[in-house]
Amino acid sequence: MTRVEPPPEPLATGHSAGRAEGVASGRSFAPTAGASALTRAQLNERALYRRAVEAVIWGMPAVNYDLMLQGLTPWGGGPNQVAYWSRQLDWRNQTLTPNPNTVYLHPFYDTKAAGPMVLEIPPAEDGCSITGNVDDCWQSALEDVGPAGADKGQGGKYLILPPDYEGQPPAGYIVLPSDTYQGYAILRSDVKSGSEADVAAAVAYGKRVRFYPHAQADDPPETRFVDLAGKLYDATIPYDRRFFRSLARMVDYEPWLTRDKAMIGPLQTLGIVKGEPFAPDASTEAAFDAAALEAQAVVDLRREELFDPPYFAGTHWAVPAAHEVIEGNTNFYADPNAYPVGDRAVIYSMGYFSAKHLGAGQFYLMALHDREGQSLDGAATYRLHVPAKAPVKLYWSATAYDRQTHALLRDVTRASRASNSPDIQANPDGSVDLWFGPEAPPGHETNWTPTRADRGFEVLFRLYGPEKALFDKAWVLPDLERAG
């Protein structure tokens, strides 16, 4: 595929803010004879390219969702079914930063034809519970479920309503109005340990979830479960023309949200118009390829900026999400003076789902660099010291992901170690030393997570059932330290 080089930066044409910035920075944004001499075709090409870059940044969460849904097709899955894994994940799950230490179930809803959908969550019992969230297709949170959610661990029936629903919702449900027809739930059936028996128990408990149209609530049909264990399920972000095909599909299917109507015109420039076929020509698709790569570079740069300041002073651990996005995802971006589209793209370029109440059921910290500030290198060996008395009610885990794709490292034997791993070795004081590298350090095989010498990596540290000592920072996670 031929790479189309991006056009030069556009020149401003007299915007006062632009002139002020230029004066402050020593740069000039005054129009030039070269700019005025651009032909109509050149101006159109530049506009298409600029708008394509912005479309990638704006559309990231919806495309992220669509890729997960479309990834079910080869395995016979689709809307209003539950994708699940009958064992803990391996690298064949190529979603963005999934947790290999839990059992996942993903009900995907589509209320356009089916109408309201019912999601039944079983009560927590016998040490089994669900940690989960229901999101729309823009990945804004409708509600949390399970002990940290609206049912408080008692179990409950959640009713997901379409955007055009009229009338009074029926009684007896936890009602979730959705601004979009499509969306999904991310349900984690919590695993006591990584033993085969405990994993099997978590799978059996998770399959007590029920998912069906409310129109059939009097005689609910069997929930369709699609097992993806051992199957390649790729939902990584494609930074090329494929991104725009997915985005066009979402724009055509979903209603325009008021907050996004300013994108109608720019997307028309790209040939993305609701109700019309998306059929870009070869030169436009080549421009899409180049624009997507530039958008990726912009998002990667912003991701690095989110790590300053870190969560723990003097370390390189950070919450991999801007506060404005976390808040916006809980209230559908209700602040009339804020819409952090760029920071939102960062989150959904490397992960999926949002929680209604982040910190109630789970908390996340990410590291891209070691103690010395160097990027984590898959060819090197690192030690991560996890202090004793980690502030969790359930468990903690540390997982290595591909630095470029943000998915599990391909072709590794395992991707994570956790406090509930059955063979994890603790130190006499209760702390745990974890190791990351291409080969296991002698004597530390059970606490080792393999990396690939040809790939950079990042580490996500999860805390399920986080406790006060994490938030007041009485407990501090130190940096990864290069050991070889």
Image: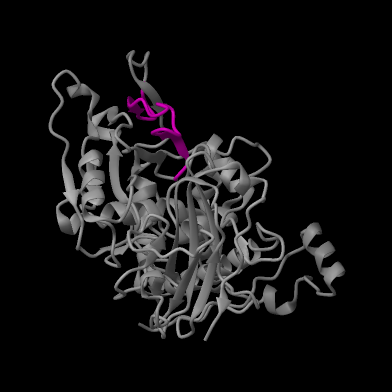
Magenta segment: 139-165
Q: Position of residue 419 (x, y in %)?
A: 42, 56
73, 456: nearer the viewer: 456
211, 72: nearer the viewer: 211
- Residue at x 63% of width, y 57% of height: 476
Question: Does residue 130 appear in the picture of this structure?
Answer: yes
Residue pushed farthest front?
428
Is residue 71 part of the magenta span, yes or no? no
34, 117: nearer the viewer: 117
Q: Position of residue 249 (x, y in %)?
A: 33, 52
Question: Does residue 45 appear in the picture of this structure?
Answer: no
Does residue 295 appear to the left or right of 192 in the view shown?
right
260, 187: nearer the viewer: 187
- Residue at x 29% of width, y 43% of height: 108
Does residue 21 appear to the left or right of 77 in the view shown?
right
Image height of 72 relative to 118, above or below: below
Q: Position of residue 417 (x, y in %)?
A: 40, 64
Image quarter (top left, top right, bottom left or bottom right) of the N terminus: bottom left
Quadrant of the image occupied by residue 406: bottom left
- Residue at x 58% of width, y 68% of height: 298
Image height of 417 relative to 210, above or below: below
